[in-house]
Amino acid sequence: MVERLRKDWIILLFCLALSFFYFWRVDQVPFHPDESTHIYMSQDFFTFFKNPLTLSYSPGNDLSKEMTYRAIDAPLTRYLVGFARMLTNSPGLFSDWDWSQSWSNNLASGAYPPNSLLVIARAIPVVLLSTALYFFYLTVRTILPKIPSVISLVYLGLNPLVLLHGRRAMAEPILLFGVILVLWAITRDQVNPMLVGVSLAVAFNAKQTGAFLIPAGIIAVCTSSDDKLRLKNMLARSLVLIAVFVVLTYGLNPFYWKSPLAALSVNFQARSQLLNLQLSDYLQGNAPRFLTSLASLITNLFISPPAIAEITKYLEPMRQQIDNYNSFLPNIWGRNLLSGAVIITLVVSGFFVLFKRFFRQTDLIRRKLILLFLATISMAVGILIALPIPWQRYVVPLLPLAAIWLGYAFLPISEAIGGLDHQNP
């Protein structure tokens, strides 16, 4: 590992520079009301260590607003915000954001966090995201030469969607960290079931979208090159992964501790009700067709400008924030039809290069490529089926995978100009 760090010192400096860049203007990232909710709920971090059973669901009791959040949302973001508050001895919020109220009423109730608290709440997610970028580079470097790997890293690290959704006190930066950790874990030469289980637990407990990577994780531990492909070995390694994932998820979610089955039922009902309400409000109750959802996914991933908010209710009071943010070119570069078409062409070309050169690779690299391709398909299909609402935040976990295949499009160019042998990264 030390030797790896010595070789990658320029990459490390780049990731460090990105971290400073993220923090430099983090206070200018437009506010999202869900940040208030995560800060408000960050009190769970302190309660977890003092009296965790008070966070548990008890059958027969009406769900409070806080208990509904615990049923619906993954816990890592609120824990990390609470941890940041503990380190800085910062107070929380005593009022949650109320979407039924006006902007001025929410401000009057104290639901808008002070700027200093907002920066503190965003700090740990930003640190984790910038750290994850180095692991992303290590992942890509196992299948590509240095030049395409750097292109993938730059595209992801400076992507306007990362600059917006990755620098808020919300689930997306933690989810990006978890997704990249999973991709790194499943593409190691020797896949460790415990490491894959931990990474999947991080992704899932950042946001339930992380569950879409579980198939790739199970296949990775079952087909690892350091074991013979025997049913007994595959079952044992899969059980280790599942056990680690379940134990960590259960431990991080005291909501399920008292009555796990009843709490799971409440979770399912609450999430279904939320999705139905979103469909009713956003799509007038009409479920989108698959092709419509696919077009929305592609548009959000590659073309549409960074979406400051999912609904327009509070955009006018935030107009100055939004204008200031959009006036800084790095925040909006490449987000239009022309540049989006170029990026889409590169990503599709990456798949073409993958299929054309697949059988020229070593068995080890072919296995990694299959796993990354499977992760891409399962994540995309999972989002299309489970999250049919065309909100830009929902496509964020696809960004690292898109960046990988964009980099793969540059493999022939890298080789033509004397690029490095990608089989010996």
Image (cartoon, rainbow, N blue to C red):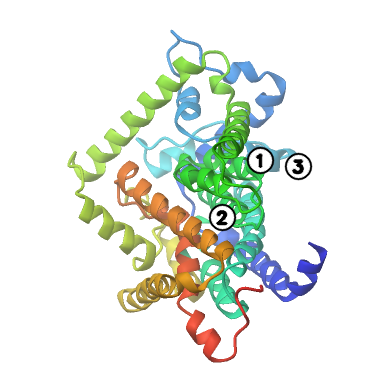
Residue designated by label 3? 87
Type of amino acid under label 2: Leu
Near-viewer residue (92 or 418):
418
Residue designated by label 2? 183
Which is more N-terminal, label 3 or label 1? 3
Which is more N-terminal, label 3 or label 2? 3
* Pointer 1 with pointer 3, Cβ within 8 A: no
Residue designated by label 1? 194
Q: Position of residue 93 (x, y in %)?
A: 58, 35
Examine the rendered structure and indicate whether residue 304 appears above or below residue 124: below
C-alpha span from label 2 to label 1: 14 Å
Element at label 2: helix
Which is more N-terminal, label 1 or label 2? 2
One can see residue 389 in this view: yes
Please report the residue visible at 57 percent of the width from the left and 37 percent of the height from the top.
Answer: 238
Near-viewer residue (71 or 293):
293
Instruction: Check disc 2: other Cα within 10 Å, few if <14, some if 14-19, many if 20+.
Output: many
